[in-house]
Image (tube, grey):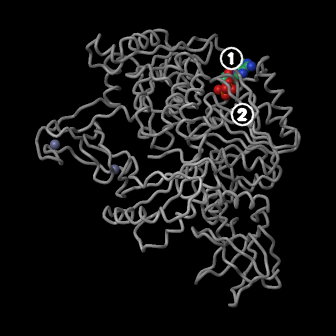
Amino acid sequence: MLFADVVLPLPVDHPFTYEIPSDIKVVVGSRVLVPFHKQKKVGFVIALHDRGGHHPLKKIEALPGPPETDLSPSYLEWLIWASHYYLAPLGEVLATALPSPFFKLDPRQSLPQKKSRSSPLADHWVHEKEVVLNDEQQKVFLQIRDNVFSGEFKPILLHGVTGSGKTEIYIHLIHEIIRSGKQVLYLVPEIGLTPQIVARLRHHFGEKLALYHSGLTENQRLREWLRVKSGTAVLLVGTRSALFGPFCNLGMIIIDEEHDSSYKQEERFRYQARDLALVRGKMEKIPVLMGSATPSLESYFNAKNKKYLFYSLTNRPEASAFPKITLIDMTVEKRQSGSPLILCRELHQAIADTLNRREQVLILFNRRGFAVSHFCLACQKGVVCPHCSVVLPYHKKQNILLCHYCDASQTLTSVCPSCGSSQMTLIGSGTETLEGELKTFYPQARINRLDRDSVQKKGALLSVLKDLREGKIDILVGTQMIAKGHDIARVTLVGVVGIDAVLGVPDFRSSERCFQLLTQVAGRAGRGTMPGKVIVQSFNPKHFSIKAVDDHAFDRFYEQELKWRSELGYPPYGRLIDIRFFSPDSGKIQHFIKWLFVQLPSLSIHETKILGPAPSPIEKLRGRYRWHLVLKGTSPSALRQTALKILSLRDQGGFKGIKWAVDVDPINML
Ligand code: ADP
Ligand code: ZN
Ligand code: ZN
């Protein structure tokens, strides 16, 4: 073969062809140095052939090595599949998958000489309990183990109520796989939020564990990568990007909390790590174990249709019982109590009782449902961010209006920006109001807060979690972050406020999210031997997703939601591709959309419904106007064909200032 197609880490849809000099031996997967315009670039060979074309081509200059940085053909094949499926340029897929030093001349040069401590995360979380599986766990463990060594692709869904011992089962399985000489990939949603998991795994697997997450520098990422490639690390634990680890001998993939939305990457190469892990598992003929207390509708559906093996754990080994859930109808509460307080009487009473017993309280508040805004009484409008189409929340400490999307801030004005009236007032209640209420009622209590703002400082998150664990916090107030994975025995009361806002999001997944969030946060209560209690405040307590959590009616929720999805053709019954358009210029984008509207009927399209073009629910974000087209259908390939036809319009019409983005299987339509 005389020529090689080389992919460079660029967002272009095609490879570049180079001549292979006679003294260089390249194969598919070779990492090569090539001239590109006036520069030199590092890329990967994806094909060899004899078709040089008419013009003399540039030559591959060198194999910069080392050989560990070449890609195996099967790995490359998997990435090529991903590039087709997600309609993403292969160069962008490679740039996402590989640590960035790969695209430098000698990646090893960038490795620090001394080994930096690989993870400060786990230090405080020593977990020394040796667990003997109980009967229920043992049974599930044995059944899964039988499938794990079958030498076939086996997708397995493990539904286990919160605290039922899913992680223990993973650990037992990992031991077995490692003993058989193979490697394991263990995906978790967000490592920073769940340092306990890492500590537990470190305790078991010590130096054999490699860690991969967004907190690593690119060089640390490279180091862990090479440890996995060489086989010195047999267990790779990490967030979604760990999916791209270069295993030489992968034996199993575990996806913890498979329903979690952080498995979806929402920029550039938009992939869903769970789905791509299943594809990898299929190619490698290995089991893929997905676990959750609240599976995604997609996975539940696949299990129901026997596409996945399904096992469940229904008990908590240690706790006496599940936390008791009490639903408070806030319309009634407001009428009866007439009080302006955020928390209802029952929750206040429960907090007081819990503090008296020296136990701990978590309060989940939903940011969306919890904001003070600067509001005009004359025109009934809140002050909107100049760059985003959202009403700005008020931050009391700094006395400003601050946009959570673009960070723009504004001081309060006395005149309404919409109508010029001077009847401006602050309305609503926010985090600070809630904290204030708690401080007034429980002056002795140690109260802390966990949300994206409060953990911006490095180490802040860990220190809050550590304090909680060590009993130095009595009441922790927080966003969804507090619902994830924490296993703290002295937390016996969970309060939930503002859950209704989750249902108010204009997205077909809002009921699913509400159900998952409520179930997960309720699962934080009573994980030790002391009984737990959950109090949920809602203005909409009859909603089926809330009611189902209250009744512990897992199947009922899924069946009802599936019925609705099937009527509307939404996933898991149908598939979606979201094509988005952005421009900072509203006139330009309107003009473009009109043009697009005229073009669409001329494309011959099969088995696809095109919804839109329509403005995105958040029409303006960070200064850009946003429109989108949603493609809906049951055949993924027909859907992709349609998307390609629409994408082929990209270079027509001369619309320079319009940016496009394609999201296959979108999970966030805002
Ligand atoms: P999940 O992953 O389902 O939330 P975990 O594996 O984290 O559950 O288990 C919850 C808690 O119960 C952990 O502290 C774990 O060590 C403990 N645990 C699980 N199984 C057993 C068991 N058989 N005996 C004693 N403790 C157990
Ligand atoms: Zn006004
Ligand atoms: Zn903004």
For disc 2, the marked residue is 305
Residue 375 at x, y percent in the picture: 21, 38
Q: Is residue 473 visible?
A: yes
Residue 253 at x, y percent in the picture: 74, 42
Going from the N terminus, do you reach mark 1 or mark 2 first? 2
Dot 2: element: loop
Q: Is residue 405 or residue 562 the one in the foreground?
A: 562
Q: Is residue 529 or residue 524 the one in the foreground?
A: 524
Instruction: Judge left or right: residue 4 versus residue 521.
Output: right
Q: Eyeballing the image, is 453 above or below 514?
A: below
Instruction: Judge left or right: residue 161 versus residue 25.
Output: left
Q: Is residue 208 visible?
A: no
Corner quadrant of residue 319: top right
Q: Is residue 249 or residue 538 the one in the foreground?
A: 538
* Amino acid on which the number 2 mark rests in the picture: Asn
Instruction: Judge left or right: residue 351 versus residue 384.
Output: right
Q: Eyeballing the image, is 466 above or below 416?
A: above
| Gap in angstroms between the C-alphas marked 1 and 2 | 25 Å
Residue 36 at x, y percent in the picture: 62, 80
Ligand 1, seen in the image, is in the quarter at top right
Q: Which mark is residue 315?
A: 1
The residue that appears at 71% across and 70% down in the rendered structure is 44
The residue that appears at 65% across and 68% down in the rendered structure is 103
Q: Residues within 10 Å of mark 2 (few under 14, many from 20)?
A: few
